[in-house]
Amino acid sequence: MKDKLIPKKIVEELNKYIISQDEAKRSVAISLRNRYRRKQIKDNKLKREITPKNIILIGPTGVGKTEIARRLATITDSPFIKVEATKYTEVGYVGKDVESMIKDLISITYNKLKSEKITELGEKYREVILLKVAKLIKPYGTVNLDEKDILLKEVKDGKYDDQEVEIEKSGSLEEPLIEVFATGSETNGEGVKGIIDNIINSIPNTKKKLVKMSVKNATEYLLRVEIEKNIDLEELKPIAVERVEEDGIVFIDEIDKIAQREGAHSEISRQGVQRDILPIIEGTTVMTKYGAVRTEHILFIAAGAFTLASPSDLMPEFQGRFPIKVKLNTLTKEDFIKILTKIEFNLLLQYKELLKVDNVFISFTSSAINEIAEIATELNEDIENIGARRLSGVIEQILNEIMFEAPYKEAKIIKIGKKDVAKVFEYSEEEENLDDYIL
Ligand SMILES: Nc1ncnc2c1ncn2[C@@H]1O[C@H](COP(=O)(O)OP(=O)(O)OP(=O)(O)O)[C@@H](O)[C@H]1O
Ligand SMILES: [Mg+2]
């Protein structure tokens, strides 16, 4: 973890996915490092004086604000949640439940830990279970040692997958006690589910019956039972709490929408929302079903376009907690070309791979890519600036016909040149009504 947090390394990693916006990348990297530095300080009194270096990212839509925060979290493997500041201005939300952002964050973190644990235990017990299943196929008394090894290998390789075996199944396990892919948040009624689970689990389970299943299903079933027997969910809770407290990142989008301009009126007090969020940012303890979570080390990254309001319209206390303000720039045509070609798993690659599935092999000439970037820039200028989001729309239109016609009778190699791109957009060059075909 420590090495992952070196600012230069973070920027290096961010560069793989985000073009331009160097200042923003630097700032988030520094902030994250400063949190780590602050944690290392032994003198608690001094430590308390050092406030977290939260950040406000300022910039138009689609230039990478959310993307930077999201990638930052992935790269550093930090618990991450994105919330919209405006959510807390909705009726029914006023003055309460701002804490739900922390509750949701810990829910996500806990569920992630849980599925990691399930995977880990699955790997640990797979061998044992395969042995058990092998015994069901041919009782070991009847085979010698060599045959046993061969049998086990065959079971592993799936040779007996469809063969039926008889296993003992206990009633309550029809429904998995653990939902591997549970991602529900604490505020989404998991509470009720918890109660129901408890009732189900408290019913004594004495009924055992023999059932027939395929080897494949039996293996999965027995493995699940084994995992459920061995997983200690209680032990995961404090780990989740610690990870959120130490490494959590909360991304608050649309922060400009809760900034109050001088003399402006709104139905719901925007300052009220700032006041509600403030304690969480300043450091408070939020009670969750996983334990009490202290928020003082959580890194907050806020973002907004700030076209109508400016960061100085936020309450002074609020501004004080976000000492770093970074502007993101509008992306240029050159940036678009880089986004299309240089970043890992870029859009062009994504479409290439999608079509490969249907044996269609597409490629773009560099002048075609140049043209795509050019068109995206023009459309942003002429219709609405939606930043890099424009690119997928443009490509989608170019490939529309190919994607509809495929698969063809035979494998196909298609080279897309500048003319092919221009053809799709030729009306725009004649400046006809753009709205007719741009959805
Ligand atoms: N600088 C960039 N480099 C690479 N890709 C980018 C960049 N900016 C935006 N994108 C692409 O555009 C998409 C939208 O960007 P993002 O979600 O970061 O916008 P945003 O700045 O948060 O806008 P909004 O204000 O609308 O929330 C991203 O998923 C990403 O694929
Ligand atoms: Mg965003």
Image (cartoon, helix red, strand yellow):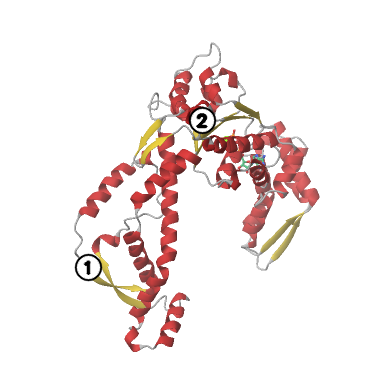
**Residue 76 pos. (x, y %):** 56, 45
Q: Residues within 10 Å of mark 2 (few under 14, many from 20)?
A: some
**309 or 203: nearer the eye?**
203
Q: Which mark is residue 47?
A: 2
| Element under disc 2 | helix
Q: Is residue 252 above or below residue 157?
A: above
Q: For the residues marked 1 and 2, what is the alpha-carbon distance in whole angstroms?
A: 58 Å
**148 or 166: nearer the eye?**
148
- In the image, is 375 to the left or to the right of 302? right
Residue at point 37%, 88% (across, down): 143
| Lower position in the chain sequence, tag 1 or tag 2 | 2
* Residue type at the position of mark 2: Lys
* Residue type at the position of mark 1: Lys
**258 or 228: nearer the eye?**
228
- The residue beneath circle 1 is 208
Residue at point 71%, 32% (across, down): 382
- In the image, is 27 to the left or to the right of 110? right
Residue at point 62%, 55% (across, down): 404
| Element under disc 1 | strand
Res 122 → quadrant: bottom left
Res 132 → quadrant: bottom left
Asked whether the viewer can see residue 418, the reply is no
**Residue 195 pos. (x, y %):** 26, 45
**Residue 337 pos. (x, y %):** 74, 44
**Residue 362 pos. (x, y %):** 71, 58
Q: Give the residue furthest to the top.
A: 263
Q: Give the residue furthest to the front.
A: 43
Q: Residues within 10 Å of mark 1 (few under 14, many from 20)?
A: few
Q: Quadrant of the C terminus?
A: top right
Asked whether the viewer can see residue 25, the reply is yes
> How many numbered badges does the structure rendering display?
2
Indicate yes or no: mark 1 CB to ligand 1 under 8 Å: no
